[in-house]
Image (cartoon, rainbow, N blue to C red):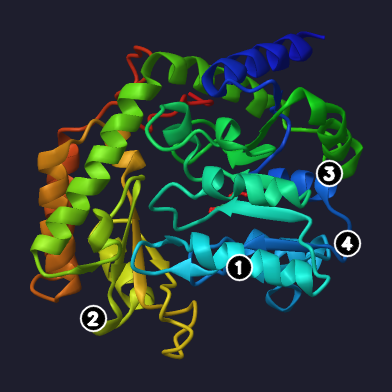
Amino acid sequence: MYIDEVEKIAIDLAKQIFHAEFVDVRPVSGVNSNLIAYTAFTSPGDIALALSIPNGGHISYGRLELGGTAGAVRGLKIEYFPFDENIMNIDIDATRKKIERLISEGKKPKLAIFGASVFLFPHPVKELEALLHSYGITLMYDGAHVLGLIGGHVFQDPLREGSDVITGSTHKTLPGPQGGIVLSWNKYSELLKRSAFPGNISNHHLHHVAGKAVAFAEFLSFGEDYARAVQENAKTLAEGLASRGMRIFGERVGYTQSHQVLMDVSMYGGGGILEKSLEKANIIVNRNMIPTDIKAGRHFDNPGGLRFGVQEVTRLGMGKNDMDYISELIVSVVTGKKSPEDVSLKVAELRKSYQSIKYAFDTSRTAYEYISLRR
Ligand SMILES: Cc1ncc(COP(=O)(O)O)c(C=O)c1O
């Protein structure tokens, strides 16, 4: 009974952040949330549109042969959104043509999955909504990465732009406990609830629900400032890297409007190798596929890119000057000018000034300080 009250509080707070009619806080992860949406809106064998992995798509939209959740678990056939590398976004005109072609061939998609793992710019939901809905295609928006930017009003507003359902993680730009969430409209509430239970969740993770409620309450007080700072920091990091000679994707369109920066390191040995060197330097980044990887014969072990996310350092209170300094440190490791060991000392020195969490309720605890269970 008490946990039901906590769950209701979490739902009400999330409704306030996202202006959603329907919220489910039970999903235990982003992939779990995606499966809930797939189960609600598709049947095995249906066609869905999504981004390919080299163009930023997540493995949960992957085809059967890739072992992706959509293909291998839900049995969906995935057609890729055409992608324009120059703007690092879905190509709107080519997508319109592709939809018309698929329809004329009798291959009408049931679902369009917007969203991505490399998610630099808002996706064209409002531009494609009328066409998709005119053919009865459901619009799903995977906001796993950008949920905090949506809640902080700095990215896009997928529900108002025509999305039928938003899925997401509660531990990326929305700084909460690891978990998932589904946001939608009242008209889909019964369908989505049934898809969550008994479809995809039996016992949900009760302790995470309380954590989500705290994170949402905190986000209502600090979320807008945090989201703005995240976006500003990502842009400054991109500019710092580009001004030091690095090739940053999305140059023509200002590099990024999200928390992420994508850098081509194919000429410096590859993302897999550099991810490890940077970790030795105390800089945690992600190796990532880039649009040219498949053609160049590179694969996920050592792809051509590195993906940076600034959401965590921003939460520690770092700002633009720090981003510029961090870009200098990254470049010195990537180009081999400095050893990772030397740089690791500089990173530790920088981190000394940032010992508490900004954009959070007051606490006497320092960042990452955990309550000791045994004394
Ligand atoms: C676009 C996207 N969707 C879903 C997920 C999965 O989220 P989770 O790790 O919460 O399962 C990720 C993970 O990074 C992602 O990038």
Question: Which amino acid, by three-letter code, is at mark 1?
Answer: Lys
- In the rendering, which numbered label is found on residue 97? 1
Mark 2 and mark 4 lie on one chain; the one further toward the N terminus is: 4
Q: Position of residue 114 (x, y in %)?
A: 59, 52
Gap in angstroms between the C-alphas marked 2 and 1? 38 Å
Per the image, label 1 sits on a secondary structure element best described as helix
Gap in angstroms between the C-alphas marked 2 and 3? 45 Å
Mark 2 and mark 1 lie on one chain; the one further toward the N terminus is: 1
- Verify CB contact (< 8 Å) between mark 3 and mark 4: no
- Verify CB contact (< 8 Å) between mark 1 and mark 3: no
Question: Which amino acid, by three-letter code, is at mark 4?
Answer: Pro
Question: Which amino acid, by three-letter code, is at mark 2?
Answer: Tyr
Mark 4 and mark 1 lie on one chain; the one further toward the N terminus is: 4
What residue is pinned by disc 3? 40
Gap in angstroms between the C-alphas marked 3 and 4? 11 Å
Q: Position of residue 23 (x, y in %)?
A: 69, 25
Q: Characterize the local packing of mark 4: few (<14), some (14-19) or many (20 or more) Cα atoms within 10 angstroms.
A: some
Mark 1 and mark 3 lie on one chain; the one further toward the N terminus is: 3
What residue is pinned by disc 4? 44
- In the rendering, which numbered label is found on residue 268? 2
Q: Characterize the local packing of mark 1: few (<14), some (14-19) or many (20 or more) Cα atoms within 10 angstroms.
A: few
Q: Position of residue 183 (x, y in %)?
A: 66, 31
Q: Position of residue 276 (x, y in %)?
A: 33, 70
Residue under the image location 45 percent in, 16 percent down = 220
**Camera-nearest label, 4 or 1:** 1
